[in-house]
Each structure stands twice: as structure tokens, then as C-alpha cells.
Image (cartoon, grey):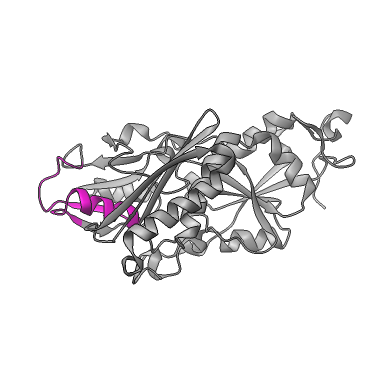
Amino acid sequence: MDTWLGNDTESARPIRTGRGYHGPHIMQTELFRIGTRGSALALAQAHETRSLLMQAHGLPEEAFAIEIISVTGDRIQDRPLSEAGGKGLFTKEIEEALLERRIDIAVHSSKDMPTRLPPGLELSAFLEREDPRDAFIGRTAPTLKGLPSGAVVGSSSLRRQALIRRMRPDLDVVTFRGNVQTRLRKLAEGQVDGTMLANAGLRRLGLAHEITQLLPLDEFPPAPGQGAICVEQRSGDLRAAAMLEPISHRETATALACERAFLGALDGSCRTPIAGYARIEGDRILFSGLILTPDGTKSHDVALDGYALEAEALGQEAARIVRAKAGEEFFDGWA
């Protein structure tokens, strides 16, 4: 078993969290393995998680190992992910490593997570959410509305594609795959006139200076979970739970419980243009959701508020309302 050795006996102290000790003499003497995709953004998220764990438990960097795991979603570049299997393409291999105990936790972008996890796994921590807005990066114009008619905008997200088409039906919207740096390179080469990326991801990569416009939430609502990092663990793993408990942000976890319930009740996947955003105000939660047809010509929205303690139920009710508004025929072709 791999271990790390500190300079003194303090290196093997029990894990302490804000609620005291978890489990009988849980000792941090073995490497704590963090699984992640290999993109620059995924690694930035894994490093952020590691830094929070180091601060929370007073542990050195060498107490952790970041394990890069190749996932199908990153290898497929020749077609939309909606044609290849959806969100699970970004998590399958990492979750297999988790179930096989090759890693202790997995760090993901919350918006990439399917709403149904494999048996034996759970999301036990959500880091404090970054700005959830979408960012436009324009080459021929600084704003989406300022692009000339017929301009080409690239995006790999069906939600963003549908929202762009709803706002600007005169634009040519094309599928645009690749990691953040690849898309920026393609933009600079003139393959498209503009592209859309998550503001949170650009900020985590130190690339916020590339943004030419931040889209307002009321015009361009985000994907459920956008801007939030989540951490997955094996169910019943007390060591992982003890490590993660002090770094989970309660308000973010509550907001995402609502958003993921909305998404799950609508059977959301990479094949479904769905937006949803919840925010916490005191003991209340305010949620707004939107469903669209892929061409952006039809949409239905919903806005609800309730007690934060009922976040999941609120998300499910919002899904029921919007589904009733749209009618079942609206969802034909989504599966």
C-alpha cells in the first residue's frame, strides 16, 4: 500500500473536521487518491479540491495523489456527444476506477454528472459555486447580438445552441468540440466567428481576459450545476466522507439538489436542451428552469420558490409544471 511519510508524528494524526473526529481512529497515513479527467480545466478543479482538503485537515501536498483517467467523452472529437451516449461519457471510466478502489474520490464538473449514479457511488461534496453565467468570446464582434447575420457560432452544448438560435435565428450555429484551449485556438484560426464557454471554467484557468461578453442569466440561463465542482465517493466509505465533510459548501449543495432534481425528473442528458438555476436567500430557495426544442423555436419556463429544506421536492415540482405546460409531444425525439 502506498504511504506518505511526514517529518514527525503529527503526520499520522487522526483527521479532524468541523464536527470532530469521524470514525474510530481514522488515520491519514495512506495516499488519498483523487481521480480526474486529464484536461487543463479538470486538473485545475482537482488541484482546487486538493488545496481545500490540505487546508481543512492540515495535510501536506504529498498526502494526495492526483490520478488522471482517460474518459470516452474526451476521446470522441468527430461527432456530438448526444450521438455517442451523453453525459456518462465523461464519468464512466472514472467511476469504474472508484468502484475498483483505484482512487478514493472523483472530482467532476457538476454539469457533466448524470442524475443517476452507478450503485455504490454518491455525490458527497459540492465546492462553493463559481459564477454560473455563460461567456461569449467573439472574433468579429464582441457580443452575440452584435454579430452580423450569417455569422458562425460554435458550441458543443445543445442548450447553448438552442439558446443562440432562439436569440439569433439568423446565425449559423455549428457543433464545436474540444477542450477550452482547443476551442480558443479554433476561434483564433477563424473557424468560427464566436464561441460560448462557461465563465467559471475560464476563470479557473486564468482565461477570463478572453471573454468579450457575459450573458445575463435571464436571457441565457445556465445548465443545471454549471459553475460547481462536485466530488463523488463510494457509499459507506467513512474515510472519504470524513475528508470531504468540511469542504462541502452547504448552499451550493442545496441549490444543486434542486437543479439536479429538476433535470432528473425531465430525464435530462446531453440530448436535452435544459437550463436550470437555483439560488439561496436565507432559508428560502428560488429556482428558475427552462426547456427548449433544439432549434430554439419553442420553449417553456418555470419559476418557483420555497424553503431550502425542500430543495429536491421544489425541483421535482418545477419539472412537473414545465412538463405539463409543454405537453408530452414536446419531448418527442429527446430519448
Say whether residue 190 is visible. Answer: no
Residue 39 locus on image (x, y percent) = 49, 50
Q: Image check: 181 left or right of 27?
A: left
Residue 226 locus on image (x, y percent) = 44, 44
Most extreme residue toward the left is 149
Say whether residue 158 is visible. Answer: yes
Residue 48 locus on image (x, y percent) = 57, 36
Q: Quadrant of the C terminus?
A: bottom left
Residue 305 locus on image (x, y percent) = 45, 39
* Residue at position x 48%, y 61% in the image: 87
Residue 95 drawn above or below residue 109: below
* Residue at position x 37%, y 38% in the image: 133
Q: Which residues are magenta?
A: 144-172
Q: Please state which of residues 67 and 313 is positioned toward the viewer in this rendering.
A: 313
Q: Image check: 142 left or right of 48?
A: left
Q: Image check: 209 left or right of 23?
A: left
Residue 331 drawn above or below residue 212: below
* Residue at position x 89%, y 41% in the image: 24
